[in-house]
Amino acid sequence: MKYNVKISQKIKEIVGLETSATDILIHEENLEKHMLKSRHRKMIKYIPDVATILDSPDFVGQNKNVKTESFEVIKVLADNVLVAVKLDKKNDYFFVASVYDITDSKLNHMKRNGRIKAFDKIEDK
């Protein structure tokens, strides 16, 4: 299945995105293929939850090693689920590039070094 969700203005502000793009494409079949190739098989079970994770993450941040406009959201479920989102500049929309798990120690390190910030959905309303 392929569908779009809207990016929260609050997420754009937190990570400093300046693009006018507001749609995030979620292409479940392509995402699953990517995850199988990238050895993220264990996280495939979270693909149906990606829209919900994007709507109400626990943490939001950016990977400074990614050169394009992008952001990451993390939701703490049974696993720490990181959803990586990148901008398709040519077509002016975001897309979910990957979903993978991170360890508790990696999550804590990301919080300590400021790579991610807590996301409070209530403030977005």
Image: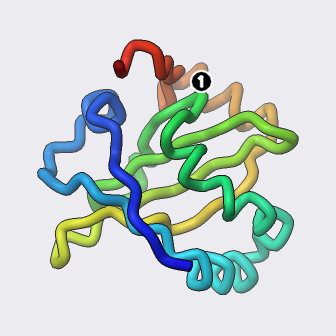
Q: Is residue 18 left or right of residue 121?
A: left
Above/below status of 20 relative to 77: below
Above/below status of 116 relative to 74: above
| Residue sitting at x 23%, y 43% | 17
Q: Residue farthest to the top? A: 123
From the viewer's side, name the closer residue of 112 and 83.
83
Kind of residue sitting beneath label 1: Lys
Q: Is residue 25 left or right of residue 47?
A: left
Picture coordinates of residue 83 (x, y %)?
Answer: 57, 53
Picture coordinates of residue 120 (x, y %)?
Answer: 49, 18
Above/below status of 60 relative to 86: above
| Residue sitting at x 15%, y 51% | 19
**Tell me, what colour scheme is on the image?**
rainbow
Pointer 1 residue:
111
Count of numbered tags: 1
| Residue sitting at x 50%, y 23% | 119
Above/below status of 74 relative to 71: above
Quadrant where the N terminus sits is bottom right
Picture coordinates of residue 3 (x, y %)?
Answer: 45, 70
State the image quarter where residue 103 is shown: top right
Picture coordinates of residue 4 (x, y %)?
Answer: 39, 64
Dot 1: element? helix
